[in-house]
Image (cartoon, rainbow, N blue to C red):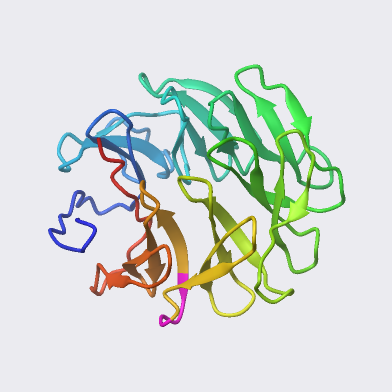
Amino acid sequence: MNADGSEVERLTDDPANDWAPTWLPGSERLLFLSERTEPTDLPHAVPGGWVYSMAGDGSDQRRMTTEVTHGLDIEISPDGRWLSIPTEFLGLHILEADTFDLEMRFSMPGWSWAPDGTRLAGIDRSGLWGNLTIMEFPSLEKTRLSDYDAFDYRPAWSPDGTTIAFESDYRDDGGVYLVTPQGTARRPLPTDLPEDASLRFPTWSPDGSQLLVHRSDAASRLYVIDPQTGESVELAAELESVCCGAWSPDGHWIAVLADGDIYVSSSDGEILLQLTDDQGSNHSPTWDPGP
């Protein structure tokens, strides 16, 4: 559909669940995950998380993987060469984007590609805790950036590659922190929100000047925060429960979910448009990256 909610077109109609739509760079095709089964599947095959591809109009739908199952999401490396797919049971899978061949599989949740595509940030849980770790790719050499007794989660590289935002339960109520890829200058994300606000799911704006975060200690809320000043703007304040924001490629708009419907908010919180209003539940809004 268009960004104003017009021209809604259904692309899949299989009875099985489909999720995590992702535009394939440099093409007019979409990747998505599905629980569909195929006639060639073994009788005991467990449906879940296979990678499918289709044209942007929903035609030519085909399964691209047999080894990767129970996928949760799809991320494409910045150079477009690799697909990384976290799975429910089997860790992180990395596939060749051109052939969909499985390149490697390892247990390292919370993945995020560096902007140059040569490193991944993830969470090393080889010990008692889960610590933020940088992994060179494809050598898989690891450097741990934290060594405290706590769990880190969901690292996100800034677009210029100088800063990693991540969640940590270093404080009892959890929060978002910032650190350099060298492990220096670790500090909490500055914010004008209450000190006990529990912030999660950091997502950088395309130009790296703002962070979108989810506040979960009270009602589910979304905020855009300036990581330099801590100034915050609440999105869709008039809605009761808001989550799961996705930045538009130009950084001016953010698609959000509220009560099963998709809305678009301006990044300054001044404009809010409702895109869907139906009896179903909508998920995983994603933007067309454009030409």
Q: Is residue 103 above or below residue 134?
A: above
Q: Please give left or right for residue 221 compared with residue 28 in the image.
A: right
> How many numbered markers are drawn?
0
What secondary structure characterizes most of the magenta part? loop
Q: Please give left or right for residue 251 compared with residue 9 in the image.
A: right
Q: Position of residue 215 (x, y in %)?
A: 59, 70
Q: Position of residue 240 (x, y in %)?
A: 45, 82
Q: Is residue 47 above or below residue 105?
A: below
Q: Is residue 281 above or below residue 32?
A: below
Quadrant where the C terminus sits is top left
| The furthest residue to the front | 229
Q: Is residue 278 above or below residue 25?
A: below
Residue at (43%, 20%) from the top-left corner?
A: 101
Q: Quadrant of residue 55?
A: top left
Q: Is residue 131 magenta?
A: no
Quadrant where the N terminus sits is bottom left
Q: Please give left or right for residue 16 compared with residue 101 in the image.
A: left
Residue at (55%, 79%) from the top-left corner?
A: 219
Q: Please give left or right for residue 186 compared with residue 205 in the image.
A: right
Q: Position of residue 183 (x, y in %)?
A: 78, 38
Q: Position of residue 141 (x, y in %)?
A: 72, 21
Which region is colored magenta? 238-242
Along the viewing direction, whichever of 37 and 116 lies nearer the viewer: 116
Residue at (67%, 22%) from the top-left corner?
A: 140
